[in-house]
Each structure stands twice: as structure tokens, then as C-alpha cells.
Image (cartoon, helix red, strand yellow):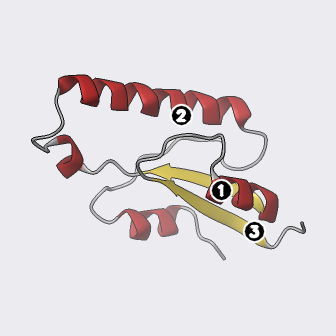
Amino acid sequence: MAIRFRRSIVWFRRDLRLDDHVALDLAARESREVVCAFVLDPSLLRSDRVGPPIVSFFFDALAELRRDLRARRNRGSNSDREADGREPRHDLSHRFPLR
């Protein structure tokens, strides 16, 4: 498949896996650069259904995702950046212009 895009943003939401991630696979095949983003939703952590063990598991999985992305990095951005969670798409589009 040919490179169609200069840059793509893959937004990780609740699925933090790299294996079998359709959007990430497609972006990697069709883009020169792939920016991976995760935006923490505070309301998810404040839910009555989420206790300390789930929060701990979630942050461990997020740390593992970051390690895996760093280990696999062979194209794309070489820095980790934090975005403003209130307007994640707006903030990301300014930090990483798609055009």
C-alpha cells in the first residue's frame, strides 16, 4: 500500500493494545509519520464502578503502552507530549498539523 498521508493521529481510548489495532496498522501503512495519542477522561476514573484496583491496572496498562510505543518507534514523533484533556482534538491538531 502506498504512503497517502504525511501524518496521521491514532487516538487510543479504552483499548490500549498495539497488537491487532486496526487504526494503528492502517496509519502505519499509509502515513509517513504516526502520532499516537491518549486522552485521560477524569470522569472514567470517578465512576462508582471504578475502584483503586481498576485504576491501578489502567495506569499500569498505560505505562506499558508507552513503553511498547517507544520500543517500536521507527518512524514518527520522537517525543512524548501531554495535551489539554478538555479539548484534545484541538490541542493535538495544533501540536501536530496534519497538512
Rendered residue at 41%/48% (across/down): 14
Residue 85 figure quarter = bottom left
- Few, some or many residues within 10 Å of mark 3 (<14, 14–19, 20+): few
Residue 6 disc label? 3
Residue hosting label 2: 65
The residue where tag 1 is placed is 22
Q: Position of residue 42 (x, y in %)?
A: 21, 48
Q: Is residue 57 left or right of residue 16?
A: left
Q: Quadrant of the C terminus?
A: bottom right
Q: Residues within 10 Å of mark 2 (few under 14, many from 20)?
A: some
Position in image of residue 27 (x %, y %): 71, 60
| The furthest residue to the bottom | 99
Given residues 36 and 55, the one toward you in this image is 55
Of circles 1 and 2, the one toward us is 1
- Residue extending farthest to the right is 2
**82 to the left or right of 66:** left
